Image (cartoon, rainbow, N blue to C red):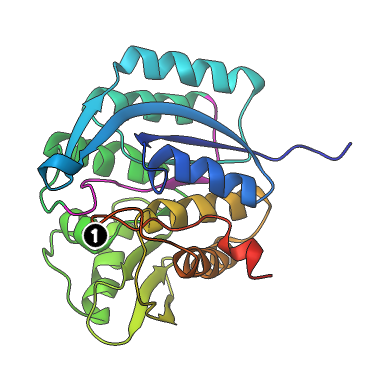
Amino acid sequence: MSKIIKALTIAGSDSSGGAGIQADLKTFEEYGTYGFSALTTIVTMDPDNGWHHNVYPIDAAIVAEQLKTVFAGGPVDAMKTGMLGSVDIVKVAEKAIKENLQTNVVIDPVMVCKGEDEVLNPESANAIRDLLLPLATVATPNLFEAGVLSGLGKLTSIDEMKEAARLIHALGTQNVVVKGGKALGGDLAIDVFFDGSEYTVLETAKIEPAYNHGAGCTFAAAITGGLANGLSVHDAVVKAKDFVSAAIRRGYAFNQYVGPVFHGGYRLER
């Protein structure tokens, strides 16, 4: 029997299935990896109130017990974090990474739910910046998160994305991908990858209609899957861009508020 490749996600639940821990586990499966999970938060979205989000963090001690279960078998081949929900949960994730000498760590610094425009928990955002970014093999902030972490505020151009990536790299992460996606003007979905010395601009044509709920989580999970399978960081990022583009192309309208990506799109198109 061939070696089982293992990946871990520490993230919140999205019951719509497009984002969060559901997206991560489905993506891991598409990458041929065995997925472990530690649930940090439960997010609900109310269709009777304009799809308003409510976020319910899980007690940090319970998150720690989940991670004790996962790491009973030793380090995994790669891992990622998503929505963490509280400073105490951030500290639990930091401790698990350090104590288990975990490598191939992808930090997706989730600060806001799609459709919202305020940081869910500023103290948690600061803890991610100070405690987790220095442990990251790759950090994958979106435009909003990159603006917060870099201190630059709203990012509106590739040059600003590059500068944000440089500043975030200086916080300690080995590599940075600023996920611009469809948020920049023009006809291209643009991400910027920075490895500490060189910038790579990743461009694909924007997809319409853009069923992209969960695209950010899926992108970070795909990078994690690539690293678990032994790809270089650069190659894992490039493949993840292709993977999430296919997932958006195969997405669908779940309701009038959200259209999730379909995580099997990459496989189906091949």
- Which structural element holds mark 1? helix
- Residue 269 is situated, as x and y percent measured from the top left of the image, at 63, 70
Q: In this view, does 87 lie above or below 144?
A: above
69 sits left or right of 165 in the view:
right
- Residue 99 drawn in magenta: no
Locate the C terminus by quadrant: bottom right
Q: Which residue is drawn at 18% across and 46% down?
A: 51
Residue 33: image x %, image y %?
66, 43
The mark tally for this picture is 1
Residue at image coords 49%, 23%: 99
The magenta stretch is 100-115
* Majority secondary structure in the magenta region: loop
Q: In this view, does 236 lie above or below 116?
A: below
Q: Is residue 233 left or right of residue 171?
A: right
User: What's the residue at 23%, 26% (across, down)?
Assistant: 56
Write down the quadrant of residue 180 in the picture: bottom left
- Quadrant (top left, top right, bottom left, bottom right) of the N terminus: top right
Is the residue marked by circle 1 packed among few (<14), some (14-19), or many (20+) residues within 10 Å?
many
Residue 182, percent from left and from top = 30, 73
- The answer to whether residue 86 is seen in the rendering is no
Rendered image quadrant of residue 16: top left
Q: Mark 1 points at which residue?
A: 146
110 is within the stretch colored magenta: yes
User: Viewer-proximal residue, 194 or 8?
Assistant: 8
What residue do we see at 27% from left, 40% from top?
A: 128
The amino acid type, in three-letter code, at marker 1 is Ala
Instruction: Out of 264 and 21, give the one closest to the viewer.
Output: 264
In the image, residue 93 sits, relative to residue 167, either above or below, namely: above
> Where does the image place residue 9, in percent across and percent down from the top left?
48, 36
